[in-house]
Every structure is written in C-alpha cells, then in structure tokens.
Amino acid sequence: MTLSDIGKIDRIRARYGHALASHSGLSLFIYEQEQGLEVTVREDGFSVRTRDGSYLFPVGSDGYKKDFILRRKGVRLIMMREEDVLFTQSVLPDFEAVHDRDRDEYVYDRAEQASLEGHKFQKIRAKLSRFYRENDVVNVPIDENNIKDAYSILEKWTPKAGEGDAAGAGKALDNFRALGLSGMITYIGGVPSGYCCGGDIGGVYMLCSAKQISDVQGLNLSTKHELFKTLPEHITLINTESDHGSPGIRMHKNDQRPVMMNEVYTGTL
C-alpha cells in the first residue's frame, strides 16, 4: 500500500458514507505491516485481507460488495457495521453475525475532551491537577525539531496486554509529515516521557498512537488532553479505535466518557 492509496480509499469511504476508523486510509496504511494487511483498491470499492485470512467487510458499491460476498464462501468477515450485516443477509439470508465487543471503536466529543467541563469529568480533572502539582510537566506539539524525542519514547516503550507492537507507531512517525499528522510530547523533569499522535479522517480525529515510558498517574491523560485542545474546530469527534479486549484499556477508555461506540460484528460467509 502506498501513500497515494490513502486518498483513493478515503474517497470511496466518503462516497459510501463509511465512518469506521478501521477502514480509513490512515489506519490501513499505518497498520498494514503490524497486522499483516493486504489491501486491494478498485474504482468502485476496496477490500482488506488480514494475516489470518479474515476480511474487513468491504467498502464500495452494492455490486462490488455483492460480488465480494458471493466469491468468498467460508471466509470470516470482521469489522462489520449493522448495515453491513443486513446487506450480507440480503445476499445470503442464512448469514449470522455476532457482536464483537473487543473491536468496538470508542468515539468522543472533541469539544468535551478539550474542555473537560462538567461533573462527568471531575475525576479526570482531579487526576490532571495532581499530576501537574506533583511533577515538573511541559507539553510540546510534535514537530521536526522534537520528533526525535517521540522516537526515543517509542524505542523504550514496553507494550502491555492489548497494545500491539511498535511497528504501526513507528510507521506513523516515519510518515508524520506526509500523513499530515499532529501530536504532543509530554516532558517530566525535562525527560520525554509520553507522546500521542493522530490525524483527520474526514472531520473525525483518529488517535493512532499513544505511548509512554513512565507509570506516573495522569501522564497519558495530560498528553492526550493537550493534543485535543489543539485540534481545529472542524473536528467534531475523536475516534480512539478499540480496546482489543484489554480490561485496563477498556477501563481507561470508558473513564474518558465516550459519546458513542461504533459497534462492530463478525460472521462467516
């Protein structure tokens, strides 16, 4: 997959009203190597095969999707929206799908995340207040002068359950400017300790990477909050993708108060 494929994919998504971050050109480009993705782009649609032989439900015209379904008997489909399930059942009436909670995408209101106003964010504000009170903290947007510090964090980062590996995060940094990404680095006592970055996928900001090398409470919240404060007004929502079934990540994402979940389903043709 090349950088030019991103635009092709996102134009198809926009044409057919597809909003899942999993199918965005940015996500597919970044995670292609990490997840072993094989992306096929046509004029009227695109499909994505995963390392284990499953497919993300295709995006495209009804004809493209119908042909895809009829040609892949026995194939497992993932990342299906409810309307994708219904479409598949219109082609194969006996098709059954189940809710895949571990892959649901968390979606947040950008203005809420930038302000953190109101009772529901009281706990987060308290954590941030303590973090800034107890630590010498500086947050700086990522640019060509300090991106090396983001690389240094990634190099020292140790993944926890459900966090994948460093390949996707590294690819995002390698192509930071070409992808039009933005990000934030948090320094504690002058030491680069955490960073996050993401990009616009059509009026929605996809947070594609958040890494830290310190267990100080509030670090992750601080980095993301400072980034969200810098997002332009035309960004209305923030998509932080799924929790991959990790209890810790699920708790953290729920604590940040999503305004909705992009529910997804899986089934076998």
Image: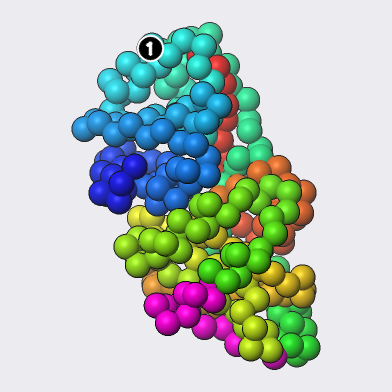
- Looking at the image, residue 78 lies above or below residue 202: above
For the residue pair 107 and 210, the one nearer the viewer reads as: 210
Q: Residue furthest left?
A: 43
- Seen in the image, is 49 located left or right of residue 139? left
Residue at 61 percent across and 50 percent down: it is 165
For the residue pair 140 and 23, the one nearer the viewer reads as: 140
Residue 73 picture location, percent across and down: 46, 10
- Seen in the image, is 95 located left or right of residue 102? left
Q: Amino acid at mark 1?
A: Arg
Residue at 40 percent across and 48 percent down: it is 29
Q: Quadrant of the N terminus?
A: top left
- Seen in the image, is 15 located left or right of residue 234? left
How many numbered badges does the structure rendering display?
1
Residue 6 picture location, percent across and down: 31, 48
Residue at 65 percent across and 66 percent down: it is 156
Q: Secondary structure at mark 1?
A: loop
For the residue pair 25 and 203, the one nearer the viewer reads as: 25
Residue 17 picture location, percent across and down: 34, 41
Residue at 57 percent across and 39 percent down: it is 263
For the residue pair 144 and 109, the one nearer the viewer reads as: 144
- For the record, the magenta segment spans 136-150
Magenta highlight on residue 175:
no
* Residue for badge 1: 71
Q: Is residue 40 visible?
A: yes
- Looking at the image, residue 182 lies above or below residue 238: below
Q: Is residue 107 visible?
A: no
Mark 1 burial class by Cα count in 10 Å: few <14, some 14-19, many 20+: few
- Looking at the image, residue 8 lies above or below residue 182: above
